[in-house]
Image: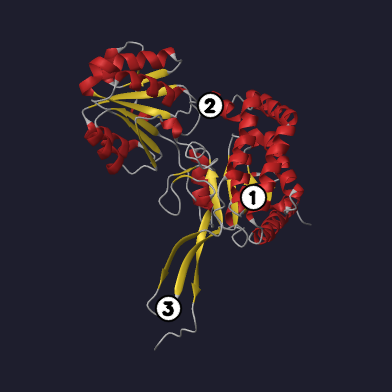
C-alpha cells in the first residue's frame, strides 16, 4: 500500500509540474504580446490594488497578528506591515513600471561585417523566473509587474508570514492580466507553504524555469545556492557601510548618517556599520553618536568610540559581520581612507557603501577602488533602491557579478539574441 507521505509528495510534484507547464506556455504567449497590452495590464493591476485596499489591509492585519504571536523581530514586522500609504505606493510602483520603456526588442548593438552581414543584438525575455522571498508583501506586486513588463512569466513563492497579504495582492495582478486579455498564468503564486515545494522548484523544474531570484536572509540565500539546479541571480545580505571621511561636512554628515541608519532600519540598504575618520573623531564623532542615540538607535563601538560616549556598548568581533536590520549600528574609528576601504573589503557583502566627503579625489578613489554593487558619494545608503534609480521598482539588489548587479529592474530581467541579416552569403572553406 502506498504511504500517505509518498502520495502527498507525488501530489505536490504534480502540482508544481502543472505550475511550471502553465508558466512556460504563458511565457511563450508573452513573446508575441505587444507593449501596449502589457502596459494596459499593469495599469489595470494598479487600479485593482487601489480598489482592493480594504481587503489587502485586512489580510495584512491577520498576517501581522500571527507574526506577533510568533514573536518575529521588529525588523521583520516592519517589513511585513502594510498601511494605506504602503498600499498606495505599491500601485504607484506598478504604474511607474508601466510607464517605463519596454526593454523587449530593443537593439542594444549593431554592426556590419566586411562580408555584408548585418548583425544586431536584441533584448529578449529570460523566459520563466522563479522568485523566492520573505516578509515584504510589496515584493509580490513589484516582482509580478517587473516580470510582466520584461515579457517574463513568473512563479512567486513568498514567506509564510505574509501568506494572506501576498495572496490578496496576487489576486489584483491576476485581475489586471485577465482584464487585458493576457494569460492569468503569466504571474502565478505557489499555493502551498510546504517547504518541499521550494525544493521541487529549485531541483526539479529546470525544464520550465530559466532563472531563480532569491530575496531574503542569509539562510534562504544559502539554501537556494546550495540546492538550485537552475541559474541563480544572487541577492546577498545588505551589510552596508557609511564612511565619514576627514573632509566631511559635519552638518551634512549628521543628516545623512541618521537617515542611512534610521529611515527604515529593516531594509537591505540601511547602513549597518559607520566608519569615522580618526582625523575628525574629536569634532564629529560625539555629534554622530548623540544623533543616532536620540533617534532611538543602539550604538556599539570600538574602544575609541566607547571613550567618546559612555552610552556606547562594546562592539564584539561579530558586530562587524552583522546585518542588524533593526535600530542597531556598529561604529569604528579608522585611520584614513585606506583603512576604511580595507574594513569594507574584509567585512562587507558587496551591496552598498557610501563616503561622505568634500574631497573629490578621496571620493573618486572610494568609488573606483571598491567593488560593491552600489557606491555613493555624499548620499544616504537608503537610496539603494530600484525605484530611486528610476527603474519603477526592483526585485532586489544583485550582489553577484554575472548577468546583473545592483537594482534588478525590468531591463535586468532580459537577455539578448543575435539577429543576422544577409544577402546570400556562404562561409568559405
Q: CA distance from mark 3 to mark 1?
A: 43 Å
Q: Earlier in the sequence, mark 3 or mark 1?
A: 3
The mark that comes first in sequence, 2 or 3, is: 2
**x and y percentages locating residue 25 in the rendered image:** 69, 61
Q: Is residue 273 above or below residue 195?
A: above
- Residue at 43% from the left image edge and 23% from the top image edge: 259
Of the pair 327 and 372, the residue shown nearer to us: 372
Q: Which residue is mark 2?
A: 75
- Tell me the quadrant of the picture where the C terminus can be found: bottom left
Rendered image coloring scheme: secondary structure
- Label 2, label 3: how far apart the Cα atoms are: 60 Å
Which element type, helix, strand or loop, lies under badge 3? Answer: loop
Q: Residues within 10 Å of mark 1 (few under 14, many from 20)?
A: many
Looking at the image, residue 10 sits to the left or right of residue 319; the answer is: right
For this view, does 381 lie left or right of residue 419? left
- Compared to 328, does 144 lie above or below? below
**Residue closer to the observer: 141 or 92:** 92
Q: In front: 378, or 300?
A: 378
Q: Give the labeled residue for mark 3.
A: 116
Residue labelled with disc 1? 155
Which of pointers 2 and 3 indicates the residue nearer the eye? Answer: 3
- Crowding around mark 3 (Cα neighbors within 10 Å: few <14, some 14 to 19, many 20+) is few
Q: Quadrant of residue 153?
A: bottom right
Question: For the residue carrying disc 2, how many other residues have a C-alpha within 10 Å: few (<14), some (14-19), or many (20+)?
Answer: some
Which comes sooner in the sequence, label 1 or label 2? 2
Element assignment for label 1: strand
* Quadrant in the picture for residue 34: bottom right
Amino acid at each position: 500500500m502506498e504511504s500517505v507521505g509518498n502520495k502527498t509528495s507525488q501530489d505536490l510534484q504534480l502540482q508544481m509540474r502543472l505550475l511550471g507547464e502553465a508558466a512556460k506556455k504563458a511565457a511563450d504567449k508573452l513573446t508575441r504580446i505587444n507593449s501596449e497590452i502589457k502596459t494596459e495590464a499593469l495599469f489595470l493591476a494598479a487600479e485593482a490594488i487601489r480598489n482592493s485596499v480594504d481587503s489587502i489591509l485586512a489580510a495584512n492585519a491577520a498576517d501581522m497578528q500571527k507574526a506577533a504571536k510568533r514573536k518575529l523581530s521588529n525588523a521583520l514586522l516592519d517589513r511585513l506591515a502594510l498601511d494605506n500609504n504602503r498600499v498606495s505606493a505599491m500601485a504607484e510602483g506598478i504604474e511607474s513600471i508601466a510607464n517605463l520603456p519596454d526593454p523587449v526588442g530593443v537593439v542594444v548593438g549593431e554592426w556590419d561585417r566586411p562580408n555584408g552581414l548585418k548583425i544586431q543584438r536584441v533584448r529578449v525575455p529570460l523566459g520563466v523566473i522563479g522568485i523566492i522571498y520573505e516578509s515584504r508583501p510589496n515584493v509580490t506586486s513589484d516582482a509580478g509587474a517587473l516580470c510582466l513588463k520584461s515579457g517574463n512569466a513568473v512563479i512567486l513563492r513568498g514567506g509564510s508570514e505574509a501568506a494572506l497579504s501576498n495572496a490578496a495582492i496576487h489576486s489584483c495582478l491576476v485581475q489586471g492580466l485577465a482584464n487585458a486579455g493576457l494569460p492569468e498564468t503569466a504571474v502565478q503564486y505557489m499555493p502551498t507553504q510546504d517547504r518541499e515545494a521550494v525544493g521541487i522548484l529549485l531541483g526539479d523544474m529546470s525544464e520550465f524555469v530559466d532563472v531563480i531570484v532569491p530575496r531574503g536572509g542569509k539562510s534562504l540565500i544559502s539554501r537556494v545556492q546550495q540546492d538550485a539546479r537552475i541559474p541563480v541571480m544572487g541577492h546577498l545580505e545588505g551589510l552596508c557601510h557609511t564612511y565619514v571621511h576627514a573632509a566631511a561636512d559635519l552638518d551634512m554628515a549628521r543628516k545623512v548618517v541618521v537617515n542611512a541608519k534610521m529611515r527604515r532600519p529593516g531594509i537591505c540598504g540601511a547602513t549597518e556599520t559607520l566608519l569615522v575618520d580618526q582625523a575628525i573623531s574629536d569634532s564629529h564623532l560625539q555629534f554622530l553618536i548623540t544623533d543616532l542615540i536620540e533617534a532611538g538607535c543602539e550604538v556599539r563601538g570600538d574602544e575609541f568610540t566607547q571613550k567618546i560616549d559612555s552610552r556606547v556598548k562594546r562592539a564584539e568581533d561579530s558586530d562587524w559581520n552583522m546585518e542588524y536590520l533593526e535600530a542597531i549600528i556598529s561604529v569604528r574609528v579608522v585611520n584614513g581612507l585606506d583603512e576604511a576601504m580595507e574594513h569594507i573589503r574584509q567585512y562587507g557583502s558587496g551591496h552598498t557603501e557610501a563616503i561622505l566627503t568634500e574631497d573629490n579625489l578621496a571620493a573618486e578613489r572610494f568609488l573606483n577602488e571598491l567593488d560593491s554593487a552600489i557606491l555613493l558619494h555624499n548620499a544616504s545608503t537608503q537610496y539603494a533602491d530600484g525605484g530611486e534609480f528610476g527603474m519603477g521598482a526592483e526585485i532586489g539588489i544583485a550582489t553577484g557579478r554575472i548577468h546583473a548587479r545592483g537594482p534588478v529592474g525590468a531591463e535586468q530581467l532580459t537577455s539578448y539574441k543575435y539577429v543576422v541579416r544577409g544577402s546570400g552569403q556562404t562561409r568559405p572553406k
